[in-house]
């Protein structure tokens, strides 16, 4: 995957500027995170950055956010934690408004045992459609394959849905916003007594400005 | 006695050329020679004419002196001397012509022999003419007194054109179409038609200036448009529609439905705050794009139509260009001879 990404990057650097587009910028993020039961829920804000590159039918995107999550009202959690999430996608346009994509997700918690860390491979599709000149809306559905958790367990069903918006505000400045809802049906066997459901659910909103060339 | 001799001379046909008599003679000796000839005193006329040649004479007077000598020797039956005198005369004045009906046969035959013994280009004539380019020619006439290689050129201020090159003798009639190798008429202006005859070491040239003018060519103007056909705008503004708003609703609704569908009952419903922020931004963007004037987009049909129209105009202009070239070649050419700056001369 890294080799493919590096290859795409080198290809993009060597290509004429007109055939590619680069966007990057900072982002403000909000997150709602729930784990195991409705009583264990967190909410918080943070910052991050996003970078995207398109070259002909290929696209490469990466986003990183770091959020401070605190227990919400009525939560059974005692303390909050800091979550760091990194997402990466490589896409290929199979039609004018549809592309297939693969990627990775890596979310860690600090302190490490206060929440589940997650690592998985993304496989899915994305649909993008221009709303008008310089404005594009997109919808993403990724299956999170082979998820790994810091607390063990497995998940046969994990989905990641996203809504994205890219608007040209003025000149090279773009407004970027995306929403990601993630559902992981994790099951664990904590004491060898049999598997129990330990689902994870989070929703993230990232809003920011970007510079596009 | 004197009147009888005068009658005899008249009977033998020795008469003074009328043209020569009309010319004024300044030199006194030559005038006396002419008077002596008129009085049929040939010996005295010959003596005085030879004496005048030793004095300062103009070209015309010198030619006149040799002419008196020619006629005098002719009257005295000294044909060889008469021929020599006439040779000197025509070398000075190549255009000098004797009327066979007014001079004695002896004198005329001596003059004719003299002409055949020197190389001359005489009586170069270019008549005024007017013709359409490609359908006529400039007539050039001249006489060569001996068989010779004759080259005829039309020399202009910018360029020179070869009219003819060939071996000629006697009366020559040439036609110059006044065209360039590509068919265009030669440029208008003043040309000098030079006829150069060469026989061994002897050469002689004569020239005649002419003015060659062009008539007005009624050319067709090039087209910038075809009557009745106008270029269409190559971009068009699509009609305003609710499509952007609909798409925003569709995508936001999809995210909402997906979120609600995936929310587990055990974890409770999510706050929807995150979806609300991004969804609202999407809907607002959709609304703005709906209300905004749509951007112009290329009108493929109009672009194709304009391309065909331009090709048609270009094709028509190409035809007009060819037609104008053809018309330019068919210009009315007018040729007028100009006064000669000087007579021809042996070289």
Image (tube, rainbow, N blue to C red):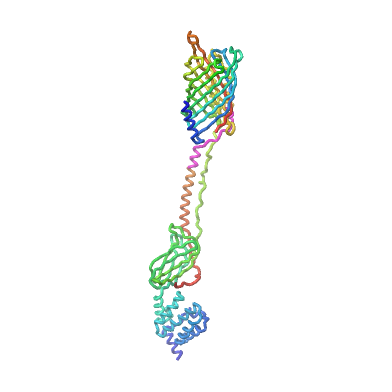
* B166 up-or-down from B14: above or below: above
Q: Main secondary structure of the magenta part?
A: helix
The answer to whether residue A160 is magenta is no
> Which residue is located at x 49 percent, y 13 percent?
A187
Can residue B289 be seen here? The reply is no
Residue furthest toward the right?
A73
The quadrant of the image that shows the N terminus of chain B is bottom left
Residue B85, picture quadrant:
bottom left
Residue furthest toward the front?
A111
Residue furthest toward the bottom?
B1
Give residue A142's position: percent from left, percent from top: 49, 22
* B337 up-or-down from A49: above or below: below
> Which residue is located at x 55 percent, y 32 percent?
A212
Count of number-bearing discs? 0
The boundaries of the magenta stretch are: B285-307
Can residue B135 be seen here? The reply is yes
* B225 up-or-down from B79: above or below: above
Give residue A157's position: percent from left, percent from top: 48, 17
> Which residue is located at x 51 percent, y 44 percent?
B229
Q: Is residue B346 left or right of residue A67?
A: left
Closest to the observer: A1 or B268? A1
The answer to whether residue B292 is magenta is yes
The quadrant of the image that shows the C terminus of chain B is bottom left
Residue furthest toward the top?
A193
Give residue A158's position: percent from left, percent from top: 49, 18
């Amino acid at each position: 995957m890294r080799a493919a990404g590096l290859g795409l990057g080198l290809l993009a650097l060597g290509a004429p500027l007109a055939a590619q587009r680069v966007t990057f910028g900072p982002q403000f993020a909000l997150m709602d995170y729930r784990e195991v039961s409705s009583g264990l829920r967190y909410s918080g804000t943070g910052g991050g950055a996003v970078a995207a590159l398109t070259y002909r039918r290929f696209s490469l995107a990466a986003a990183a956010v770091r959020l401070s999550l605190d227990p919400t009202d009525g939560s059974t959690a005692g303390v909050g934690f800091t979550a760091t999430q990194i997402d990466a996608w490589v896409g290929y346009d199979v039609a004018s408004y549809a592309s297939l994509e693969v990627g990775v997700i890596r979310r860690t918690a600090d302190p490490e045992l206060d929440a589940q860390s997650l690592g998985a491979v993304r496989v899915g599709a994305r649909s993008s459609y221009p709303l008008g000149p310089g404005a594009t809306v997109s919808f993403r559905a990724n299956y999170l394959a082979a998820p790994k958790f810091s607390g063990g367990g497995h998940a046969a069903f994990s989905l990641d849905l996203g809504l994205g918006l890219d608007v040209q505000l003025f000149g090279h400045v773009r407004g970027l916003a995306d929403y990601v809802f993630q559902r992981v049906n994790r099951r664990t066997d904590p004491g060898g007594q049999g598997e129990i459901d330990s689902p994870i659910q989070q929703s993230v909103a990232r809003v920011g400005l970007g510079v596009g060339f | 006695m004197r009147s009888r001799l005068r009658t005899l001379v008249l009977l033998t046909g020795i008469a003074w050329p009328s043209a020569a008599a009309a010319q004024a003679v300044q030199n006194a000796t030559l005038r006396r020679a002419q008077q002596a000839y008129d009085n049929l005193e040939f010996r005295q006329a010959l003596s005085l004419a030879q004496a005048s040649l030793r004095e300062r004479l103009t070209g015309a007077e010198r030619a006149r002196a040799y002419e008196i000598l020619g006629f005098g020797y002719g009257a005295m039956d000294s044909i060889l001397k008469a021929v020599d005198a006439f040779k000197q005369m025509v070398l000075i004045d190549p255009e000098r012509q004797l009327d066979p009906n007014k001079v004695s046969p002896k004198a005329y035959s001596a003059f004719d022999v003299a002409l055949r013994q020197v190389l001359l280009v005489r009586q170069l004539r270019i008549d005024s003419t007017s013709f359409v380019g490609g359908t006529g020619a400039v007539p050039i006439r001249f006489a060569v007194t001996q068989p010779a290689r004759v080259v005829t050129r039309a020399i202009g201020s910018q360029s020179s054109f070869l009219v003819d090159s060939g071996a000629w003798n006697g009366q020559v009639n040439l036609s110059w179409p006044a065209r360039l190798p590509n068919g265009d008429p030669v440029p208008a202006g003043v040309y000098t038609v030079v006829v150069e005859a060469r026989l061994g070491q002897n050469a002689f040239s004569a020239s005649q200036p002419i003015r060659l003018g062009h008539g007005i060519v009624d050319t067709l103007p090039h087209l910038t448009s075809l009557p009745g056909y106008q270029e269409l705008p190559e971009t068009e503004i699509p009609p305003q529609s609710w499509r952007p708003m609909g798409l925003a609703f569709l995508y936001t609704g999809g995210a909402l439905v997906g979120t609600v569908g995936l929310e587990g009952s055990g974890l409770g419903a999510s706050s929807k705050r995150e979806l609300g922020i991004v969804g609202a931004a999407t809907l607002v963007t959709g609304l703005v794009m709906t209300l905004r004037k749509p951007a112009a987009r290329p009108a493929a049909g109009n672009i194709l139509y304009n391309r065909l129209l331009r090709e048609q105009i270009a094709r028509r202009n190409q035809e007009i260009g060819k037609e104008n070239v053809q018309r330019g070649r068919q210009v009315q050419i007018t040729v007028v001879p100009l006064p000669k700056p000087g007579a021809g001369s042996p070289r």
